[in-house]
Image (cartoon, rainbow, N blue to C red):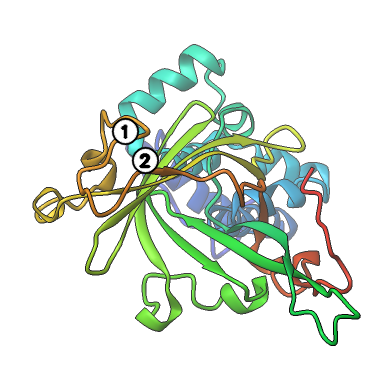
Amino acid sequence: MASDISISVPSELSSFSRLRTVQFLGTERPWLRFGLLHRLEVSVVFARTSPYTLGRAACVCRKWRYTIRNPSLWRTVCLKTWQMSGAETNYKIVQSMYEGSWRKMWVRRPRIRSDGLYVSRNTYIRTGVAEWKVTNPVHVVCYYRYLRFYPSGKFLYKVSSQRVKEVAKCMNFRASKADSVFKGDYTLTEDHLEAALLYPGSRHTLLRMLLRLRGTTIGANNRLDLLKLLTTGVNESEIRNQEDMLGVVEGWQEDETHNPDVPAISHRRGLTPFVFVPFEEVETSVLNLPVDKMDYFVPG
């Protein structure tokens, strides 16, 4: 049932599916042509969509769900997320641990999220100045720790009293010195994350963190438990030609310091778990509430 606009295909090339598709586009049944083009357009859109949006889109209809289960979509996402492991290692992991399913690997394998900020809200009580020996005021002090991770193994760190919606604007590599955003390196092994960064100044100080990654639901990866927070001194010669801070502290003990002016300290306060806040929710997050409306926050 070919039309005048159908494209003839040589017999010697009829085995190529691409040319058969071209011939199919010349049919007089435009609804079939529209359906094919629609599926192609949807596939292109899904290929440029974030994994979390794909999960929501899969709930729209059966056709979208079938299209989104295409292994090529999840393979690209997984290779980008775990690019530090290398493509060969990722292929071995997906075959040995996840039955060859890239989608299962994405859901079940621990991964650090890079589409938002991990926020730790900390509060403590500070005694105020007594007035006229009648009142003894106390103040609830609130501050935040912010972490933003990148698939390349770099992360950004900031401690501030500013709210999430204000800090999200400056948590990038273009931040100025006035923003006090520090850059460091991290590595993820199973569900444990080790991170290190250098505080610039006259006395070089290294901040080391050990965190545990978990989720409130399967595949969420939206919590980071701060297990250890250490500060230690380092010599200038050790960091002169070293860009990877984890390589500097490799093999160090917790109480080890290489600068006598900067003692090694293991901090016991301000270890509230980190809560993940996606960028699209930074304006509406409950972590923006002031202390008078939320004096204490339970991460869960």
Residues 31 and 84: in front is 84
Q: Residue at x 52, y 15 (%)?
A: 97
- Foreground of the two, 142 or 4: 142
Q: Visible in this render: residue 28? A: no
Are there few (<14), some (14-19), or many (20+) residues within 10 Å of tag 1? Answer: few
Report x, y in % for residue 286.
81, 65
Percent position of residue 66, x then y? 71, 38
- Location of residue 246 with respect to 282 vertically, above or below: above
Per the image, label 2 sits on a secondary structure element best described as helix
Given contact means CB atoms under 8 Å apart, are the residues at marks 1 and 2 in contact? yes
**Image spot of residue 144 (x, y percent):** 62, 64
Residue pointed to by mark 2: 83
Image height of 216 relative to 21, above or below: above
Against 97, residue 241 (above or below) is below
Residue at 89%, 78% in the rendered image: 135
Quadrant occupied by the C terminus: top right
The residue type indicated by label 1 comes to Gly
Residue 220 appears in the picture as rendered: yes
* Amino acid type at image mark 2: Gln
Instruction: Give whichever of 121, 118 is nearer the camera.
Output: 121
Label of residue 86 in the image: 1
